[in-house]
Amino acid sequence: MICIKAIRRLDPDHATMKHIPFPSDLLEARVPRYTSFPPANRFSSDVGPAQMASWLDAVPDGASVSLYIHVPFCRRLCWFCACHTQGARSDEPVDRYLDHLEEEIAMVRARLPVRLQVSALHLGGGTPTLLSPDRLDRLAAMIAASFADEDDREFSVEIDPAECDGARLDRLVAHGLTRASIGVQDFDPTVQSAIGRQQSAELTAETVQALRDRGIGAINFDLLYGLPHQSQATLADTLRSVLEMRPDRIALYGYAHVPWMSRRQRLIPDHVLPNSQERVAQSSMAREALIANGYVPVGIDHYALPHDALAVAARAGTLRRNFQGYTTDEASTLIGLGPSAVSRFVQGYAQNAPVTGQWQSALSGGALATVRGHLLSPSDRLHADIIEALMCSGSVDLADCCTRHDANLEPFIRIARDAVKQMPGAARLEGTRITVTSPLCTRLIASRFDPALERSEGRFSKAS
Ligand code: SF4
């Protein structure tokens, strides 16, 4: 049963914004989301096709890898969205994309060892469900031709309820779908008009039911707070509808207004956006409502039912952070295919050309489409470990990390002491362990251990 009281208690009239203990300059701070370290906007052109090829060559025999395939098309282009995607009214560019994807898969596979396990496959975008049933069959055949199927492989797909039907779901299920990820954002019509995305609660519920009817028990929802015209009241209404559908996982992200990076976001005027205090109030209200209704908080912005693998991993301390947010995937190699896709190797990161035409040109010329990336130094690995631990569990023993990386502990203790002093109530330091005490401050605390932040501050989304 939905605990509406927990939502009503946090409706605007009862909102406890005056209790928010953080000064506004902290809430306004722009820091990375740290889905990777270093963040992707610090990748450089030092990494190209030759580096990518050598990293593929070095993947050990019998390794476990995960695959991410980026489908860079949407029938509708939502204004809030900063994903690498483009409008596609016809299927002609989609077929051309599939032709090139087939070339890329073959090129990448040829460099990998014969024995390989694919532990996870994720179709993201863009809108993967824009592919017609026969194109989904073609994509599945391309993957199967190069990568052996594994019985326990997770196959997750981002599903747009406005661009999906029973025939597509049937094909995805036949190809092994295990988890569906559905973008919701907010169901309020005014908010939806302001972000250029119409999607009713009814249509979403029909898609959820259609998935469950086909035996898909693992369903994720993506929600946003901080959207134009969004209020605690609209978010509370959305949460009521969402809780009735009871997805297994909910990602609740703060809308990142970065119009200097995303041209579409220029359609959203600044003055209709909630301010930082209101963003914090929305996030806090949603957090309390989800916890009151049986969801376990995972990391800084995910919630999962206790049986879900993400909640289990959070309890076991095995949660990982990747470009999709949080994951249970333990593979040390992630191979990204398609325009803008990022690959992660133990040696570093490699990103494909973000523009579909550039990606296609590289492949047509017989080359891998890598255009940027980052070679991890020993120092990067240490900072990445500290930041990932903070982002996943909110706590890290700095002495353990420094011992593992053969580094001097003292500078890190100094950073931790300064952070605790400058942000009272945000974190505590006990011995050599720093623990974040407010999830809202996790990115801020993590950013203190990011040596390059000063050079790039101002290009990220708000910490709140
Ligand atoms: S939110 Fe989804 S459908 Fe909308 S533009 Fe972004 S990827 Fe496309």
Image (cartoon, rainbow, N blue to C red):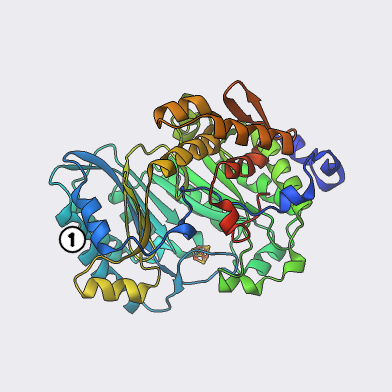
Depth check: 62 or 47 in front? 47
The x and y percentages for residue 105 are 22, 60
For the question of whether residue 292 can be seen, the reply is: no
Residue that carries the numbered disc 1 in the rendered image: 106
On screen, residue 335 versus residue 54, left or right, reads right
Q: Is residue 371 above or below residue 59?
A: below
Q: Is residue 118 above or below residue 124?
A: above
Depth check: 175 or 122 in front? 122
- Seen at 21% across and 45% down, the residue is 59
- Seen at 75% across and 58% down, the residue is 274
The x and y percentages for residue 103 are 20, 66
Crowd around label 1: few <14 · some 14–19 · many ≥20 (10 Å) = some
Q: Amino acid at mark 1?
A: Ala
Depth check: 274 or 182 in front? 274
The quarter of the displayed image where residue 47 is located? bottom left
The x and y percentages for residue 117 are 22, 41
Number of numbered labels in the structure image:
1
For the question of whether residue 386 can be seen, the reply is: yes
Secondary-structure class at tag 1 = helix
Question: Is the shortest distance between ligand 1 and the CB of mark 1 under 8 Å?
Answer: no
The quarter of the displayed image where residue 271 is located? bottom right
Give the quadrant of the N terminus: top right
